[in-house]
Image (tube, rainbow, N blue to C red):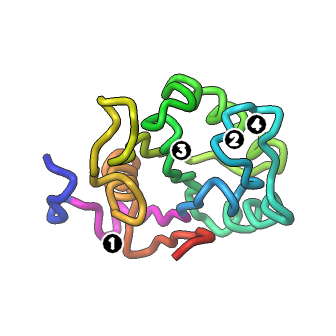
Amino acid sequence: MALADTAALPRSSNTMSTPAVFLDKDGTLIEDVPYNVNPALITFTERAGEALKLLDSGGFRLIVVSNQAGVARGFFSEHALTAVENKLRGLFSSVAARFGGFYYCPHDAEGSVKQYATNCFCRKPRPGLLLRAALELRIDLEKSWLIGDIL
């Protein structure tokens, strides 16, 4: 199924109504260090941990979504994002919040790495990351929110 096929997206129902909060990574959840994949430099923004605990206790699935153009621009490999995801898991655990997933877009139409140099559907503000998470995790988008630092 194509991501653009919204007829198959999870909707409100008695059997499936998992709401989520999608959290932008850089500048919202963690301090913005441009093109950073060094786990030692990944730290929560002020009060992010407290907010995660509140959202988690409110029954929201917490999902990190992020544009990672550094892959397309050749600054780091897509494999480097595994360490970023592991650090995020640890940060969530440190504040007793459940980590619901990490979805990222490695593309940039002006990138120098050919396989990632594309104008894709997953790059925010396009909805691809949210739609993919909704399909994979059975998220009810009508009951969900997105929190970020850029319109």
Q: Residues within 10 Å of mark 2 (few under 14, many from 20)?
A: many
Circle 3 sits on which residue? 101
Nearer the camera: disc 3 or disc 1: 3
Residue 47 within the magenta-colored segment of the rendering: no
Q: Amino acid at mark 3?
A: Gly
Residue placed under numbered mark 1 in the picture: 12
Q: Nearer the N terminus, badge 2 or badge 1?
A: 1
Give the quadrant of residue 9.
bottom left
Residue 32 coordinates in the image, percent (x, y): 72, 54
Camera-nearest residue between 127 and 9: 127
Q: Amino acid at mark 4?
A: Gly
* C-alpha span from label 2 to label 3: 9 Å
Q: Residues within 10 Å of mark 4 (few under 14, many from 20)?
A: some
- Write down the region rendered in magenta: 9-21
* Mark 3 or mark 4, earlier in chain: 4
Give the quadrant of residue 53: bottom right
Q: Residue at x 80, y 53 (%)?
A: 44
Q: CB under 8 Å between callouts 2 and 4?
A: yes
Secondary structure at numbered mark 2: helix
How far apart are the alpha carbons under marks 2 and 1? Answer: 29 Å
Q: CA distance from mark 4 to mark 1?
A: 31 Å
Q: Which residue is mark 4?
A: 90
Q: Position of residue 6 (x, y in %)?
A: 19, 64
